[in-house]
Image (cartoon, helix red, strand yellow):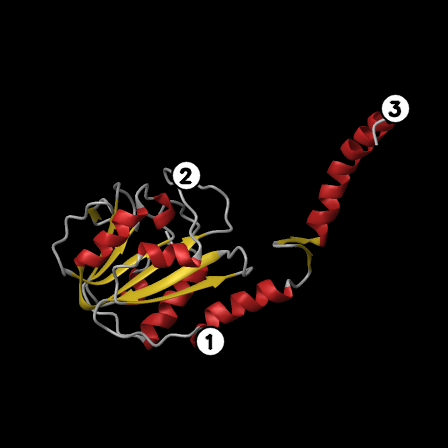
Amino acid sequence: MAQQLIVDFLAELAAKVQLPEPIVEFGSLQVEADQPGDLRPLFAGREFTGTDMRAGPGVDRIEDLRALSYGDGEVGTALCLDTLEHCDDPLAAGRELHRVLRDDGVCVVSSVMLFPIHAYPSDYWRFTPEGMRTVLSAFDSVWVVGVGPAQLPMQVIAVATKRRPLALEPGMFRTLEAEQRRWDLAPGKVRFGIVQVSLRELLGELVRQLPRVAMQRASARLHGDP
């Protein structure tokens, strides 16, 4: 189930790049009702199928990313958004996405990196941009971008194609530019390396932590520790 940033990016991509039908989402289960999970409004009037490993809201067809039941070249556009980290064999998933995609097809993959563990139902992996390239190494053209801190991106987003050139740049997508600018500027937040917290969060944490630190320092002095 994609986060709002990814949904907005996909809308921009669909306006710039022809995404052939049928459009198949791999990982379409809408796990939490308050999150933006339904991609169908982006593709109104087009052939769209939502698949996931288990039944539920947003799922039209049960599929296992490691061994898809689709035939070779049967999918026009493959979407795998905020899902790959939940597949225990992402390399097999990358090969399967390549196999089922038709020539001139487009595959869009995103996955979190700087993000807490979230069990939907299991959470296995985090991908660097180069790790994502490895997952998609069977494709002819692969474009990958990280959003957030350069050394530990919040999100890693990739677009891959078969027998079709790609001419994408990060500056083409206002959604990604705006999110990157927000991370770079950190408005109203205090930076600790790659971590950004609001002043209220910082003060609250200080209030919680200072008594513990003070007791530890007092104990160290009492026992002659440096």
Q: Identify residue for label 2.
A: 119
Residue at image x 38%, y 72%? 12
Q: Position of residue 116 (x, y in %)?
A: 50, 44
Residue at image x 79%, y 37%? 210
CA neighbours of label 2 inside 10 A, class few (<14), some (14 to 19), many (20+) = few
Q: Is residue 66 above or below residue 103?
A: above
Q: Nearer the viewer, mark 2 or mark 3?
A: 3
Q: Identify residue for label 1.
A: 171
Residue type at mark 2: give it.
Ala
Residue at image x 72%, y 53%? 199
CA neighbours of label 1 inside 10 A, class few (<14), some (14 to 19), many (20+) = few
Q: Is residue 2 rendered to the left or right of residue 97?
A: right
Q: Identify residue for label 3.
A: 222
**Could you tell me if residue 165 is visible in this image?**
yes
Name the secondary structure under disc 2: loop
Residue type at mark 3: give it.
Leu
Q: Nearer the viewer, mark 1 or mark 3?
A: 3
CA neighbours of label 3 inside 10 A, class few (<14), some (14 to 19), many (20+) = few
**Could you tell me if residue 36 is visible in this image?**
no
